Image (tube, rainbow, N blue to C red):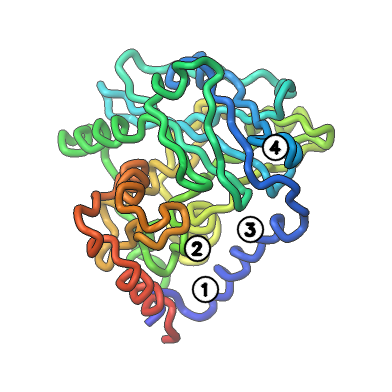
Amino acid sequence: MSIFPKSYVCQIALGLAILAAPSAMFAVTNPDCTLIVPAHPLSAAGLATPYQLVATDPTHGACHETNSTQSAFVEAAIINLITGQITIYHPVVVDAMTAPAVPPMVPTLPPLNVVAIWFGYNADGLLTLSGAVPSALSDGDCHQGLGQFAYCNASAFYAAANVEILLGFLHVPNIGTGTDGLPCPTVRHFAVVDQDQSDNLLTTYWGLPSGQVMQFSAANKAAFPTGSLVKNASDNRTLDLFVDKALGCTPWTAPDLNDAGNLVSALALNELQAAAYQAAPIALIPLNDPFVGNDLNKVNEYRTGVNQIPAFLPSLASPTSYCANMRRSRSPA
């Protein structure tokens, strides 16, 4: 039985079609791009240093951030270890050897904090991370080789967040009830996930016709009215912008440090809320996820990046169970 009435299913399908449309409109010349991670990526200076997008193999063609089939995205979450509050920041991605049209905002971080970074990618190939200095990836505890997805320091962030939740300093808002009378879905609901769940971000940038990119903010949008959104297609975006809206649900949000504290949702918030409230059956990264290649070690590395419990046995990441649950969630009412 479907979680959504047929009218909502149609709206959701329309949203998915809109998100998928850019990939059909551009010819991808090179699906394998590399992000240059700045020195000390978890520091305020590192967060405010633009990431550069370059071709992993230049003989296959260039990579351009405003090409919607190659765009890469970065999203950071910061937890204040004193108050438990989470804030969000979006490091900007630019083409190699270019600068953003507006210098990134330098975030003010709390004195005791844990920062984590997640990466998303619109191309169908492999997103690679490379350090601007040799120690950049190790300094950030960065993990890659997971298709469109990568992350830095997520394990420490989620450990801190889960402790703050237990201590009562961090409150995860209830998912609420939709207009269909059912609990609002999360990113671990089988009616929401696709074959590669938890792989991309809610991050958006503001791109100019010239090809320059800057952080998205109300101020930057007003200053450059000819710009347009550069966005990452994802389950998270589909849930928060389409499904929740259709069902009268509200995603968890936190202050955006690069947009004057305006409230935004983020992958970290989605995953923490899903961990707290998603009822069984729960969608967790399975062995047949295209980014893990039936490798249980990669399944667990991926799950670590999105606050999911590890699979100690292959049966705990069963493709058969995963696909069966997905089929049941989408069967006609």
Mark 4, secondary structure of its residue: loop
Disc 3 residue crowd, few under 14, some 14–19, many 20+, Cα 10 Å: some
Q: Residue at x 61, y 23 (%)?
A: 50
Circle 3 residue: 19
Residue type pointed to by label 3: Leu
**Where residue 65 is drawn, which disc sits there?**
4
State left or right for residue 84 relative to residue 128: left
- Mark 1 vs 2, N-terminal side: 1
- Mark 3 vs 1, N-terminal side: 1
**Residue 252: image x %, image y %?**
40, 46
Determine the CA span between mark 3 and mark 2: 13 Å
Disc 4 residue crowd, few under 14, some 14–19, many 20+, Cα 10 Å: many
CB atoms of marks 4 and 2 within 8 Å: no
CB atoms of marks 3 and 1 within 8 Å: no
Residue type pointed to by label 2: Val
- Mark 3 vs 4, N-terminal side: 3
- Mark 4 vs 1, N-terminal side: 1
Residue type pointed to by label 1: Tyr
- Give the image quarter of residue 157: top left
CB atoms of marks 3 and 2 within 8 Å: no
Determine the CA span between mark 3 and mark 1: 17 Å
Mark 3, secondary structure of its residue: helix
Question: Which marked residue is nearer to the observer: mark 4 or mark 1?
Answer: 4
Disc 1 residue crowd, few under 14, some 14–19, many 20+, Cα 10 Å: some
For the residue pair 62 and 247, the one nearer the viewer reads as: 62
Circle 2 residue: 243
